Image (cartoon, rainbow, N blue to C red):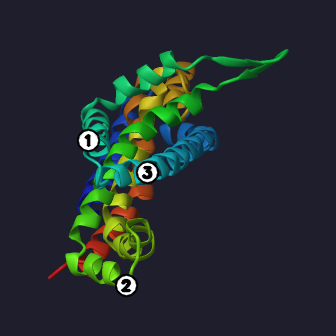
Amino acid sequence: MLTSRAGVALLAAFVASIVVAQVQAIPGQPSVVELLVKWTPLLAKGFLFNLLISFFAMLVGTLAGVLLGSARISPRPPVRGMSWIVVQFFRNAPWLVLLFFVMFLLPFEFHVGGTTIPFPDWIKATLGLALPIMANVAEILRGAVQSIPTAQWDAARSLAFSRRQTLWKIILPQCVKRMLPPWMNWYAILTMATTLASIVGVSEVMTLTLRITNAEGRTDLLIPIYSYVLLWFFVYCWPISLMTRRLEARYEVR
């Protein structure tokens, strides 16, 4: 969980890095603050790209996770067993390995008739990041369903509801508030993990940061600009973490 103390410490480190960089700067060169202001629009575009990847990865991972989680609570043992294997594999596999797996597994373009359709790297990175989210959402769903009192199932059965009707009309609606806090927590984790996409060649904020430092050729810019980007991620993810803690306290089962 992100805390306000961590934010204050990060802000202090950012300011300190600027002060140190200014002391080390060669007279006549633009200041570090001027360079940060100069490159902020480009960094903002890259950061928005990170948010775009996180949004679609969370969307795909949630939809697939709901289906996989439904298989985890299936009354059929083969379905439960296979879904358990899938969940354990993608929950425990390193995210970077999954990214490389998807990048090399999927083609760079599709040929439909005489038309060539490119398959961008950022979409493959989105799918790669969606896989661990899928597995964790499946476990969140399974835990939420199992936390519902069995009397709910018995009451629905006495009213002649089928298992599918009971699950989708009675059980899952009650699970939403229980699933929301951990779901939001995983979204914050995913947002910070989108920087891994830079390793597989996606031009997001970390890739642009590296290009900026290479273009400027100033070693004193290195720590301030990375601290600057890190501060952006904190500012975006801290409200999510704060809301997660509040929802957990509100929906806590006493």
Q: Horizontal and vertical percent for residue 171?
A: 36, 73
Image coordinates for residue 67, horizontal then vertical, percent: 43, 51
- Camera-side residue: 40 or 31? 40
Quarter of the image that includes the C terminus: bottom left
Question: Which amino acid lies under the numbered mark 1 shown in the image of this protein?
Answer: Trp
User: Above or below — where is 64 with respect to 216?
Assistant: below
Residue bearing the label numbered 3 = 67
Mark 3 neighbour class, 10 Å CA radius: few under 14, some 14 to 19, many 20 or more: some
Residue that appears at 30% across and 75% down? 246
User: Which is more toward the observer, 244 or 6?
Assistant: 244
Mark nearer the N terminus (1 vs 2): 1
Of tags 2 and 3, which is closer to the observer?
A: 2
Residue 151 in the image: state x and y as whole percent. 22, 81
**Element under disc 2:** loop
- The quarter of the displayed image where residue 219 is located: top left
State how far apart marks 1 and 2 are (Cα). 31 Å
Q: Dots 1 and 3: beta carbons under 8 Å? A: no
Which residue, given by chain and number where applicable, does mark 2 sit on? 159
Q: Dot 2: within a 10 Å radius of its alpha carbon, few (fewer than 14), some, or many (20 or more) residues?
A: few
Q: Nearer the viewer, residue 132 or 4?
A: 132
- Residue 118 on image: x %, y %: 71, 22
**To which residue does mark 1 refer?**
84
Q: Quadrant of residue 66?
A: bottom left
Q: Furthest-right residue in view? A: 114
Q: Amino acid at mark 2?
A: Leu
Instruction: Decide which of tag 2 and tag 3 comes sooner along the chain.
Output: 3
- What residue occupies the far left of the structure in this picture? 254
